[in-house]
Image (tube, grey):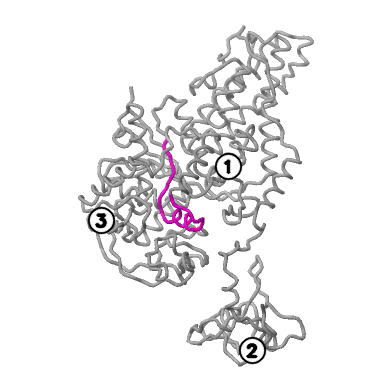
Amino acid sequence: MSNQKYTVTAALPYANGPLHLGHVAGVYLPADIFVRFLRMNKEDVLFVCGSDEHGAAITLRAKKEGTTPKEIVDRYHSINEKAFSDFDISFDIYSRTSKEIHHKTAQEYFKKLDENGSFIQKTTEQYYDEEFKQFLADRYITGTCPNCGHESAYGDQCENCGTALSPTELKDPKSTLSGKTPTLKETSHWFLPLDRHEDWLREWIKEGKFEGEELHNPKDWRNQVVGQCMSWIDGGLKPRAMTRDLDWGVAVPKEDADGKVLYVWLDAPIGYISATKEWAEANGKNWEDYWTGDSELIHFIGKDNIVFHAIIFPVLLKEHGGFNLPKNVPAYEFLNLEGDKFSTSRNWAVWLHEFIEENPDKVDELKYVLTSIAPESKDSEFTWKEFQARINNELADILGNFINRAVVLTNKYYDGKVPARGELHDVDNDVLEQLAGFPEKIAGLIRKYKLREAQSEAMNLARLGNKYLAETEPWKLAKTDMERVNTIMNIALQISASLSIVFAPFLPKKAQKIGEFLNFESNNWENAGNSDLLESGHSIGQSSILISKVEDKYVEEQVEKLKNTNMSNSNLPPQKDEVTFDDFMKMDIRVGEIIDAEKVPKADKLLKLTVNTGIDQRTVVSGIAEHFAPEDIIGKKVSVLLNLAPRKIRGVESQGMILMAENEDGKLSFVSPDEGFDGGCEIR
């Protein structure tokens, strides 16, 4: 008996918010399909996930909501765990990184690496918020991405382009606590010197080899995974801090750690290991069997996690020693929604738990649609119209229609008994030959992580069944040749039985329902394609509606709901933090008139304006040069904030700020008073 094992992980979701369809389509659903398929092939597979409950994103949410990190993680762990269960994601364990077993495992792991000399300790300058008197971890800093220019990048990653960052790489950094520009202050941390690992990482990722042993076929890895990793390596890896100055997380097990915690991307992937330990203890297993020896480690992730799972975590595994490196890291691109990106801040999302609460009978239908549009190699899009079309035109009209025909006709002609096959015609032999080939074709695609195509092939089997019945027309032959009908219906029922097997990884509930119609059950993939799954004389059940069609009204309601629950169906920013009336009254905003304007040298975006404020003439530097020519705005009445602290911009002291309106397309307009309001009039 083979000792082959599989450890399949799905990226630990942050417990700081609910799951939306973008999360599901790109990580958890494909992982579940793959695992279900392995189980049907009698493989020894462990499916691991859990809540990632540490990191700055969670402490930020707690501060914003005026609560504690523990209350945040408890709330969202419960919501997400239930959503996964209701969506029938078949984890063997769904743990959480706040558990004692995880803290202990992560600390032991850190100690082992520290003893191995895997870290370097150094003192560096880190951003510090003087007002809040604390160092700023990655998500406490926002700024302009040096890669794509996105103005709301975080200190660890730009969510616009996916680039992993360090806080000091950001342009115009701002503290998310005070909103002010942070200062740099010295602090000591433990760093993982990734630059030491470039050579073996390059060979492992590009050639699939490690220390001369072939570990994987690089052709089986997705192009975007290899491409992103090689871009990092070829650009030169740098040491990365593995500890943080935070008060929420796994404490660094060192006497001189001074209240520091483990960096979330050291802490979180070790969560896969601690969850395995937890599961093994509860099930009488040896956890090490699933991380060492003849075991394959496979990470299902989104593309924003590629670097962490294909570079940083493998380095951590190697440095510890004794662990297997990942066999594959099938990363998914992003799923968009109705022409726009999923956005939590704008509530532009379809939340998984809400969908299930409102549509408990459409779980498998949603699975089918998400797999059909899965962003395996490029970004894709979910729309409610396509949701309707996929369900109506494919699930209902092809799969549902075929199963219904086969079951209804069998009950009509044979009182629910499977008829015996008679003489086979060429069309029968052709169909049976194709039937036998489908399981291997589907299996090959699943093992190559081409789940979108694999599901399409399963539907092609249903298409074959429909075509067969349409060509042979047993309902017509029943009037003249029941012997021939016996053969046709027998073959149609054999196809139906195989459909209940090949659809089980993709649509587990619907596959089970097909089995109930047929009074047949098989969880063995090897049985699929067999032309004798149902013996003659076998009694089947009655059919009911397998797939209900989606009405136009439902689609209209969902689109309207999306627009109504969205703060604004646009790219406009959300409301800023609340201010007091006294704060507002401190601002001196008045009508001004631009009396001179010129471009600032070597600054494409800046204009130097001379503004008559009614009480004086002053210089204001404004970033509007890309929108207005200097000669076109002389004489323009504007709104100007007078008592903004002066600051030098490109060597020019700016003594105020011109107020502008900006639409969702980024177009600017002056906030101008009506006629009759001269310079100096207060705006309040």
Tag 2: amino acid: Thr
The verdict on residue 64 being magenta is yes
- Seen at 33% across and 53% down, the residue is 262
- Is 341 situated above or below 103? below
Separation of residues labelled 2 and 3 (CA atoms): 59 Å
Q: Nearer the viewer, mark 2 or mark 1?
A: 2
Where residue 620 appears, x then y in whole percent? Answer: 57, 85
In the image, 277: left or right of 659? left
Magenta stretch bounds? 47-69
Tag 1: amino acid: Leu
Quadrant containing the C terminus is: bottom right
Instruction: Please rate how many residues cluster around mark 1, counting C-alpha atoms within 10 Å: few if below 14, some from 14 to 19, many from 20.
Output: many
Separation of residues labelled 1 and 3 (CA atoms): 40 Å
Quadrant containing the N terminus is: top left
Quarter residue 402 falls in: top right
Where residue 209 appears, x then y in whole percent? Answer: 31, 45
Where residue 571 appears, x then y in whole percent? Answer: 63, 61
Quarter residue 233 falls in: bottom left
Where residue 415 appears, x then y in whole percent? Answer: 70, 8
Q: Nearer the viewer, mark 1 or mark 3?
A: 1
**The furthest residue to the bottom:** 616
- In the picture of the structure, the residue carrying the numbered disc 3 is 119
- In the picture of the structure, the residue carrying the numbered disc 1 is 352
Between 426 and 682, the one nearer to me in the picture: 682
The verdict on residue 156 being magenta is no
Instruction: Please rate how many residues cluster around mark 2, counting C-alpha atoms within 10 Å: few if below 14, some from 14 to 19, many from 20.
Output: many
- In the picture of the structure, the residue carrying the numbered disc 2 is 613
Q: Are the two marked residues, 2 and 3, in contact with CB atoms closer than 8 angstroms? A: no
Between 618 and 602, the one nearer to me in the picture: 618
